[in-house]
Image (cartoon, grey):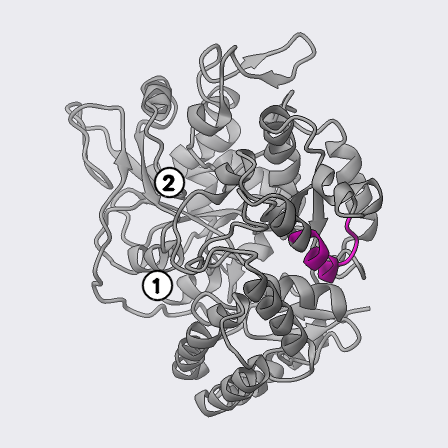
């Protein structure tokens, strides 16, 4: 198959760097310390920690990397405020400041950024020589095809790590019980109206759901559980994924943005919640830490995924809100319309402008496959950031508070089950929950479908502008007449060319489906 010729990217405005390195005299990407050793800068998502734990960890890690990979590591943080925009701006800046890029095909626009020239083409010889352990494991498991675009590898998948990142509500079982739900268990999305009303009436110090920015997800949450729409992860319009299929017609490309009644039903619920005062009036622009407010008893709900619930929410709520009985309602639970994680939900790419791609791969291979380095980047310093119990579980030192003492390295792009430790703070039923989800979660059928967006890129940009105008307001119930707003949006999407995009992707779907039948 012919190799893709990547687009040339011009220089864009670059956000302020949040570089953390523990080695004195070291610059970022391609730079050298006093010894001339390259410093490899890795882009990660998340707020840069300020408690000193990360710097201390790097002081331990970098001598090991110098020995094992002949390079050292610095971290570049794209912080959560406006992260979608800042992430893409930095990737396409072309300034050479980044070597390794944390990416994903479902939430970090991996294919889009690959086609725009942000990632280095990784030929097999380059990987085998500089990341031999990663190459061998992914090759043995047969997963390199998941990282290929027109037969070219663009990243290493995080394919040997167990997680569920299907989203939903965290809420308080104690409050839900008082609101009239048996055992404090809510089983329908729309029943959260009753729960939120109870919180509003009985807990005046708390917001029913203190949510901020793009995290509302009311539309997605409702639609997942009330239809069989499936999101096509391969095409993003800005921060949105506008294309779908249905389980009943899995090779027919459509969009719930353009057809059906589910969007209006969801938007009506969002308006009802907004009118009720479920969230703060300025939620769209609020940038406070709403999870900490949930832990403080000042919010009746939070929103993220199963992994967060089992490995953080349960422990923190039980510690900080005694008797709160934290529970999780995941989108699509009503009808089983949710998926197992993609093996490319986390992945690591090399920047196309890296001055040291070989060393970048060597550093990544070491972080991923050397247990001592793995524990440092993921857990921190033993005895300071964590301890290991007699039954081989990860615990924390006395007085440790994960909200303030966390390491924050956010290495979500190369974790391995072989080196993971169950935490004493994990929910006791974590593996039981995984087993139950495994029984009912669907396999995402399009993991090898890579959509060429070049032909409709201008229309996709126009669609992005329309969605950015309407969807946040619909999510937060800010339109007095949601039905009229949806009609306007659909007309604007039609004018922007969403119908043409659907037709173009349908052609590619048809070609792909010839060799990839969906049973």
Label 2 vs label 1: CA separation? Answer: 26 Å
**In terms of sequence position, does the residue under pointer 2 or pointer 1 come before the other?**
2
Determine the secondary structure under disc 2.
loop
Give residue 80's position: percent from left, percent from top. 39, 48
Give residue 337's position: percent from left, percent from top. 75, 61
Instruction: Please tell me how crowded label 2 is: few (under 14), some (14-19), or many (20+) other residues with Cα within 10 Å.
Output: some
**Which residue is tagged 2?**
47
Residue pictured at 72% horizontal, 34% vertical: 325
Instruction: Please tell me how crowded label 1 is: few (under 14), some (14-19), or many (20+) other residues with Cα within 10 Å.
Output: many
Frontmost residue, 366 versus 321: 321
Q: Is residue 201 left or right of residue 114?
A: right
Which stretch did the figure color magenta? 186-196
Labelled disc at residue 117: 1
Residue 294 is drawn in which quadrant?
top right
Give residue 65's position: percent from left, percent from top. 36, 24
Q: Main secondary structure of the magenta part?
A: helix
With respect to residue 388, does 177 lie above or below?
A: below
Determine the secondary structure under disc 1.
loop
Frontmost residue, 191 versus 407: 191
Frontmost residue, 44 versus 491: 491
The answer to whether marks 2 and 1 mark residues whose Cβ atoms lie closer than 8 Å is no
Give residue 286's position: percent from left, percent from top. 39, 53
């Amino acid at each position: 198959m012919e190799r893709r010729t990547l687009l040339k990217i011009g220089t864009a405005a670059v956000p302020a760097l949040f570089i953390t390195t523990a080695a004195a005299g070291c610059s970022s990407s391609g730079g050298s310390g006093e010894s001339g050793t390259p410093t490899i800068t890795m882009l990660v998502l998340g707020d840069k920690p300020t408690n000193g734990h990360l710097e201390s960890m790097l002081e331990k890690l970098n001598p090991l990397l110098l020995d094992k990979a002949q390079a050292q590591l610095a971290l570049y943080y794209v912080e959560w405020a406006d992260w979608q925009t800042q992430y893409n701006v930095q990737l396409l800046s072309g300034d050479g400041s980044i070597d390794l890029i944390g990416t994903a095909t479902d939430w970090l626009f991996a294919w889009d950024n690959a086609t725009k020239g942000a990632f280095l083409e990784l030929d097999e010889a380059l990987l085998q020589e500089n990341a031999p352990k990663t190459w061998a494991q992914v090759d043995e498991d047969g997963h390199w095809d998941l990282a290929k675009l027109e037969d070219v590898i663009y990243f290493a998948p995080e394919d040997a790590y167990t997680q569920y990142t299907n989203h939903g509500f965290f809420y308080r079982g104690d409050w839900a019980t008082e609101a009239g739900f048996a055992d404090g268990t809510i089983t329908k999305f729309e029943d959260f109206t009753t729960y939120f009303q109870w919180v509003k009436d009985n807990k005046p110090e708390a917001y029913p759901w203190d949510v901020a920015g793009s995290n509302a997800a009311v539309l997605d949450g409702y639609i997942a559980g009330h239809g069989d729409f499936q999101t096509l992860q391969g095409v993003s319009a800005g921060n949105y994924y506008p294309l779908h299929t249905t389980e009943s017609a899995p090779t027919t490309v459509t969009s719930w943005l353009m057809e059906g009644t589910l969007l209006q039903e969801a938007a009506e619920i969002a308006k009802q919640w907004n009118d009720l005062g479920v969230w703060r009036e300025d939620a769209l622009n609020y940038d406070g830490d709403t999870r900490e407010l949930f832990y403080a008893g000042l919010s009746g709900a939070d929103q993220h995924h199963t992994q967060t619930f089992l490995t953080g929410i349960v422990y923190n709520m039980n510690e900080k809100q005694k008797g709160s009985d934290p529970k999780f309602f995941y989108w699509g639970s009503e009808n089983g319309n949710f998926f197992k994680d993609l093996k490319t939900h986390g992945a690591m790419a090399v920047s196309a402008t890296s001055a040291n791609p070989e060393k970048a791969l060597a550093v990544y291979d070491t972080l991923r496959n050397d247990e001592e380095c793995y524990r440092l980047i993921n857990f921190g310093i033993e005895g300071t950031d964590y301890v290991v119990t007699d039954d081989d579980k990860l615990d924390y030192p006395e007085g440790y508070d994960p909200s303030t003492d966390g390491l924050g390295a956010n290495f979500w792009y190369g974790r391995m089950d072989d080196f993971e430790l169950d935490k004493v703070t994990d929910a006791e039923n974590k593996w039981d929950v995984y087993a139950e989800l495994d029984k009912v979660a669907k396999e995402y059928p399009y993991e090898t479908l890579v959509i060429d967006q070049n032909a409709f890129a201008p229309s996709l940009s126009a669609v992005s502008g329309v969605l950015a105008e309407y969807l946040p307001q619909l999510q937060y119930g800010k339109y007095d007449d949601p039905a009229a707003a949806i009609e306007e949006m659909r007309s604007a999407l039609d004018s922007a060319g969403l119908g043409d995009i659907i037709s173009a992707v349908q052609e590619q779907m048809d070609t792909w489906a010839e060799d990839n039948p969906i049973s």
